[in-house]
Amino acid sequence: MFLVETITELQNKLNGLKKTGKIGFVPTMGALHAGHISLVNQAVSENQIVVVSIFVNPTQFNDKNDLDRYPRTLESDLKLLEKTGCQIIFAPSANEVYPEPDIRKFNFGPLETVMEGKHRPGHFNGVAQVVSKLFDFVKPDKAYFGLKDFQQLAIINEMVRQLRLDIEIIACPIVREESGLAMSSRNELLTLEERKNAALISETLFKAKELGYQKSVHELESWVVETINKNPFLTVEYFEIVDSQQLQPVKNWEVDCTKVGCIAVFCGKVRLIDNIVFN
Ligand code: AMP
C-alpha cells in the first residue's frame, strides 16, 4: 500500500499499475470506520487497483467550526486500510487540490434545494468541486459512495450525467453501530451519554418503517420529529419523506415511487444524518 500526497505521485503510481486492470475509487474525509471500510472492501472485491482518498474538503463545509472540529486520524486510518488490500492512499494538502480558488458553480436543480442542500448552503457545490477534481486525478472505472449520504449520492449521479463521465457509481448500504446508530466520523465527537441517546434516531426510523402506511405521510413525519425531540439530547433539523429519484417531498403513500425518509438531527453541537427506505 502506497501513501501519496501529490497528484504527480498519484499518477506515476497509477501509470505503473494501470495495465493490471480496472481502477476502483473510494473518496473519504478520513477518520475511517467500518462504514468506510465496507466501501473499500467492496471496491477491492470488484477491481484490480483501488485508490482511497483522504481529504477533508474545505469547500463543502458551510460551518467553519464544523471544519475545524472535524476529526483527523491519518495514522489509525492507514492501519485500517492496510488490512483491506487497497493499493493507493491519496492524502493531498488543500493547496494540492486547490492551487487556486475553485470558482465553478454547479447547478443540480431541485436535487440541491431540499434537505441537506437547503440547510447547508453551498455544501453540494463543494462536494461536486472536490469529487469532480478527484475523479479527474484518479480516472476510476468505478467509484463507491455510501447510502448514508443519500442526497450526496443523487448529486454525484447527476454530476456524472451532466459531465458525461464514464464512471460507474456504486451505492453501498449503510453500516450501523450495534445500537443502530449510523456509523459516522462525527460520532467520535459525541460524549458517551450523547452517543447512547443518539441511537434513538435510528430506532425511531426503524419504528417509522414498521408503522408506515398506518399513518399518513404527514402524520408519520410529525411522529418521528416529536418522538426524537422528546429526548433532551436531540433536536431534529428536518425529517422529510421524499421520492428516491428526484428527492421531492411525497404527500401520500399512493405515489408510485420508492420513498425514503431522510433526517438531520443535532446531538449537542454535532449534526448527524441518517435515512430509511420505505419500500
Ligand atoms: P465521509 O468520509 O463522511 O465523506 O464519507 C466517505 C464515504 O463513506 C461516503 O460515500 C459516505 O457516504 C460513506 N459512508 C460514511 N458513513 C457510512 C456508513 N455508516 N455506512 C456506509 N457508508 C458510509
Image (spheres, helix red, strand yellow):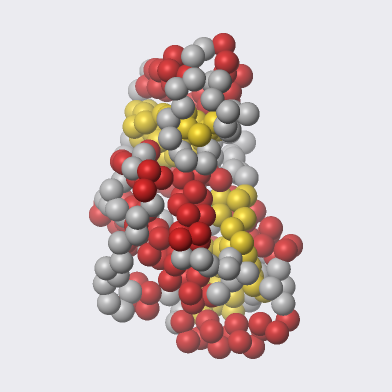
Question: Quadrant location of residue 140?
Answer: bottom right
> Is residue 221 shown above or below 177?
above
- The quadrant of the picture occupied by the C terminus is top right
263 vs 62: above or below: above
User: Which residue: 31% across, 79% down?
Assistant: 99
Residue 136 seen in the current view: yes
Quarter the N terminus occupies: bottom right
Q: Residue at x 52, y 41 (%)?
A: 245
Q: Nearer the viewer, residue 279 or 203?
A: 279
* Any part of residue 188 in sight: no
- Specify the quadrant of the image occupied by residue 71: bottom left
In the image, 77 versus 154, the foreground residue is: 154
Q: Nearer the viewer, residue 254 or 135?
A: 254
The picture places residue 106, in percent across and down from the top left corner, at 34, 59
Q: Position of residue 51 (x, y in %)?
A: 59, 71
Q: Measuring from the top left, give residue 61's x and y in whole percent.
A: 32, 55
